[in-house]
Image: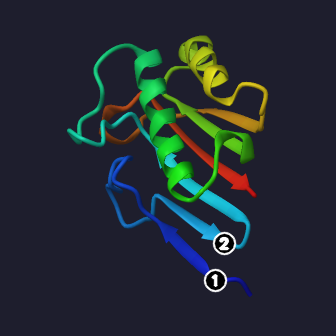
Amino acid sequence: MSKHESVLTQHAPKPIGPYSQAILSGHELYCSGQIPIDPHTGEIVSGDVAAQAERAIENLGAVLCAAGYTFAEVVKTTLYLVDMNDFAAVNAVYEKHFGLAKPARSTVAVAALPRGARIEIDCIARA
């Protein structure tokens, strides 16, 4: 059985609960959901859902980088949206970061997210 290693970076928000930013298990990285918290201020970024999506994906990228991964190695993502009317705006930001990688993806509408965020994103990456 492979050993699990916790990933922690100061370039993404500290966990706001009893969990790791990510867990590395063998060649697979399981990233916890990232919401649009600015890691320097600890606050949700201001602006529209596109600005929130940008910050959440940047946070996810920081966690990937800390583990030695890139967006190109992401095989699955899950987007959580408070309002499905935000789908197009979030999709435009998502495409900018994931480009040609195009991992498998699910998008789920939720009633609410931590700290009043409008988006959360998690992923699984494989080296």
Classify residue 20 by image quadrant: bottom left
Residue 61 placed where, x, y %?
53, 41
- Crowding at dot 2, Cα within 10 Å, few <14 / some 14-19 / many 20+, comes out as some
Q: Residue at x 64, y 60 (%)?
A: 29
The amino acid type, in three-letter code, at marker 1 is Lys
* Direction from residue 57 to residue 15 in the image, left or right: left
Circle 1 crowding by C-alpha within 10 Å: few under 14, some 14–19, many from 20: few
Q: Is residue 97 left or right of residue 59?
A: right
Instruction: Indicate the amino acid at tag 2.
Output: Ser
What is the distance, in whole Å, between disc 1 and disc 2 at their CAs?
A: 6 Å
Q: Is residue 57 above or below residue 31?
A: above
Q: Is residue 84 above or below residue 127?
A: above
Residue 73 placement, left or right of 62: right
Residue situated in front as seen by the camera: 94 or 84: 94
Residue visible at 74% across and 36% down in the picture: 105
Tell me, yes or no, if residue 111 can be seen here: no
Which residue position is annotated with label 2? 25
- For the N terminus, give its image quadrant: bottom right
Residue 57 placement (x, y as % from top left): 51, 34
Name the image quarter holding the C terminus: bottom right
Label annotation for residue 3: 1
Residue in the picture at 29% in, 32% down: 44
User: What count of labels does the image hold?
Assistant: 2
Label 2 near label 1: C-beta < 8 Å?
yes
For image coordinates 34% across by 48% down, the residue present is 13
